[in-house]
Image: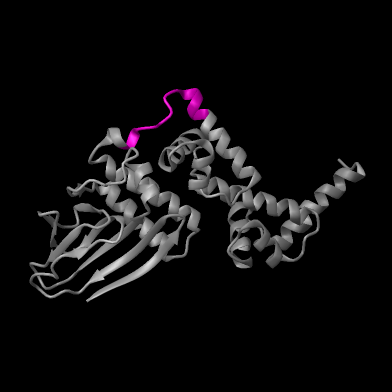
């Protein structure tokens, strides 16, 4: 009756596609939630009762879940429903909600932009996009949804001055240059910021998400290794954090328009010419 397809489970964040095929009628009484989550309704309509409050949920709304809540789901129709489940560990929930880990109980309206972003996130995860990218997008999406309930809570802790915001972005760039595989949450801890603030500040400063900036660093490191004569592409991909050799080749083609063997010849020729004093 309920099927869950997990798409991401990393660094305190989970993403899953949930399909319910419950028949029309009342659901099981007094089910307990297992953790924090934000749930986006994609299709269908159902009634959720939590903490004695009934909420009719449809694709224009999302809702939060908190650990230990007693809830019941009733279904006015027999057509089932589809939802996207975004799990947050207690630390992520608190970072998003102004230090308070108990997420809002009332339904959260989802604008057309938020609804599209959540569907794009689900699609990217289903295609096997970079987990860092999915986690970063998920955190930003969760912040956008929670802002519908209380913008001041979500904005709490944001650096107040332009200088501080630039310093945060520069600090993230420095840390990523030293370790491109550093996650958004690890970067945020190093810089004493919440992940969603850091993600937004970084994008405003550089024009790139942190995930995109990380992926810009990796092919440049690959080019440097290729210029030095590296021929083992599988080893190169593993060393630099690519999913596999084909991922490395695809990214290099996207960034430069050439495959690794052609790049090796070109960059090696350039270095040889410079060493030999040719114009």
Magenta residues (range): 154-166
Q: Quadrant where the N terminus lies?
A: bottom left
Task: Report the side of 1 relative to 244 (left or right).
Answer: left
Q: Residue at 48% across / 47% down in the picture?
A: 185
Q: Nearer the viewer, residue 226 or 234?
A: 234
Residue 208: image x %, image y %?
50, 42
| 163 falls in the magenta region | yes
Q: Quadrant of residue 87?
A: bottom left
Name the outermost residue toward the front. Answer: 68
Q: Residue at 52% across / 33% down in the picture?
A: 168
Residue 171: image x %, image y %?
57, 35
Task: Report the side of 13 relative to 208 (left or right).
Answer: left
Q: How is the image coloured?
A: one colour
Q: Nearer the viewer, residue 64 or 259?
A: 64
The vertical placement of 29 against 216, above or below, is: below
| 184 falls in the magenta region | no
Q: Residue at 63% across / 48% down in the picture?
A: 179
Task: Report the side of 228 relative to 215 (left or right).
Answer: right
Residue 249: image x %, image y %?
63, 62
The vertical placement of 205 against 217, above or below, is: above
Name the outermost residue toward the right. Answer: 276
Q: Quadrant where the C terminus lies?
A: top right
Q: Quadrant of residue 231?
A: bottom right
The vertical placement of 134 against 82, above or below, is: above
Q: Quadrant of residue 13?
A: bottom left
Task: Report the side of 232 relative to 116 (left or right).
Answer: right
């Amino acid at each position: 009756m309920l099927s869950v397809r997990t798409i991401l489970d990393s660094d305190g964040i989970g993403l899953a596609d949930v399909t319910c095929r419950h028949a029309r009628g009342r659901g099981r009484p007094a089910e307990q939630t297992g953790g924090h989550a934000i749930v986006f309704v994609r299709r269908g309509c159902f009634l959720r009762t939590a903490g004695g409050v009934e909420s009719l949920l449809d694709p224009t709304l999302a809702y939060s879940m908190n650990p230990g809540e007693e809830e019941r789901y009733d279904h006015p129709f027999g057509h089932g429903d589809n939802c996207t489940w975004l799990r947050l560990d207690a630390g992520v929930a608190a970072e998003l909600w102004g230090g308070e880990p108990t997420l809002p109980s009332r339904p959260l309206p989802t604008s057309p932009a938020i609804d599209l972003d959540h569907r794009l996130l689900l699609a990217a995860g289903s295609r096997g996009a970079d987990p860092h990218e999915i986690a970063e997008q998920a955190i930003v999406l969760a912040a956008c949804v929670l802002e519908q309930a209380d913008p001041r809570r979500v904005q709490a802790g944001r650096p107040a001055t332009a200088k501080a915001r630039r310093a945060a972005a520069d600090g993230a760039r420095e840390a990523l240059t030293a370790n491109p595989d550093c996650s958004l949450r690890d970067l945020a801890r190093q810089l004493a910021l919440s992940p969603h603030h850091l993600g937004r500040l970084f994008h405003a400063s550089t024009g790139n998400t942190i995930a995109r900036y990380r992926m810009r660093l990796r092919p440049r490191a690959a080019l440097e290794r290729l210029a030095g004569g590296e021929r083992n592409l599988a080893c190169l991909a593993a060393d630099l954090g690519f999913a596999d050799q084909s991922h490395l080749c695809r990214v290099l083609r996207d960034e430069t328009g050439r495959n690794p063997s052609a790049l090796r010849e070109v960059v090696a020729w350039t270095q040889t010419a410079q060493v030999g004093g040719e114009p």
